[in-house]
Image (spheres, grey):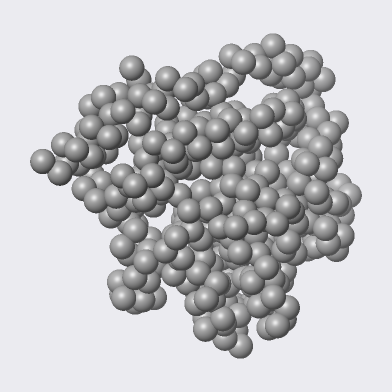
Amino acid sequence: MQVSFVDLRSQYQSIKKEIDGAISRVIEDCAFVGGKYLDSFEQNFARYAGARHAIGVGNGTDALFIALKSLGLKQGDEVITVANSFMATSEAITLAGARPVFVDCDEKTYNIDVRKLEQAITPKTKVLLPVHLYGQPADMTEIMALAKKHGLMVIEDAAQAHGAKFNGQKVGTFGDLACFSFFPGKNLGAYGDGGAIVSNNDQLALKARMFANHGRVEKYNHEFEGANSRLDGLQAAILDVKLKYLDQWNSRRRAVAKIYDSQLRGKVTIPFIQTGCESVYHLYVIRLKNRDKIASILKSKGISTGIHYPIPLPFLKAYGYLGHQPQDFPVAHALKDQILSLPIHGSMKDEEVHYVIEHLKSALEAAHE
């Protein structure tokens, strides 16, 4: 049996007629940039997220960059984020002209360790940028309290957390702005690149929308220099179809995670879900010894796995100028050699889940022989 890490083909086949129809309508209407299909998706995604505004942009990295630029960051300003995330999180900070400041992750949730967050705040700090890693919300109660205490803005990186909730409230509605990615493998994925910024702040939403469209609202009336980052009509129409199924797919991910939990508890370190959090399990990340050997055994059995992420952000060559050492981020440094992402997606069958479990258990036994 082959078990894919993500199975986009099966997902497409389940909604093929709707997807094909949506694509055809966009082409027939020649509504490739802007227009009613983008308007429809933005309205529906804003409603789904529980926000007043959603601005479709070219990709998740652009969403972060534009959100940061909308806050008026200046050279030398600092933005605090977590040590374990995808490069886009910190890359956007630098592209916006600020300096990334990393905080170690919590040993249980792998999200930003809020106990270490305040000590990273300096007079240069302007923004807190928590990541809802692997689909589990960061501790937004503590983060928003610190932001209020120190007069800071908050941008949520929700690229992996479409539909996740913290204390019953959907992520993306806590901070001043929030950013989503629609990369094909995400819980809500396009058939190409795509992203969105959501906000309940009218002024910031307008600024973000203008920045993404060359600093304008009306054609040729450019109020400032911006960028060109737009979610095209084809992707918007595709996402509008898929949005109707997102909760169903997220529910299936939680069901898969529940099976993994029940069968793997005590054999590996399974995901720890913080009280009050409703994860959407973009990734199911276990922690174990002999990670590379076990991943190799699983691969030989046709099971795809991943590592998210093999190098923490502070230790990437790109941030060598910051001079960080392993002792600066001991949890992130330890995790990099122990974490393994198992297959999980909204189309995953029970027999695939049990096949993974069976061979993971066998691999664990073989690794200890």
Q: Is residue 55 left or right of residue 110?
A: right
The extreme bottom residue here reads 123
The answer to which of 150 and 238 lies nearer the viewer is 150
Residue 295 visible at all:
yes
Tell me the quarter of the picture where residue 274 sits. bottom right
Locate residue 95, reporting x and y percent: 56, 63
Q: Residue furthest left?
A: 369
The picture quadrant where one finds residue 75 is bottom right
Q: Residue at x 37, y 40 (%)?
A: 264
Left or right: residue 122 versus residue 30 is: left
Q: Where is 213 relative to 251, above or below? A: below
- Horizontal side of residue 156 vs 44, given as left or right: left
Picture quadrant of residue 17: top right
Quarter of the image where the C terminus is located: top left
Q: Position of residue 57 (x, y in %)?
A: 69, 45
* Residue located 22% across and 35% down the image: 363
Is 267 or 197 nearer to us in this picture?
267
* Residue at 31% from the left image edge and 44% from the top image edge: 267
From the viewer's side, name the closer residue of 294 and 314: 294
Q: Position of residue 207 (x, y in %)?
A: 80, 60
* Residue 49 percent across, percent down from the top left: 76, 46
Using the image, determine if residue 157 lies above or below residue 268: below
Q: Say whether residue 190 is visible.
A: no
- Compared with residue 74, is residue 269 higher up or lower down, i.e. above or below? above
Q: Residue at x 45, y 65 (%)?
A: 105
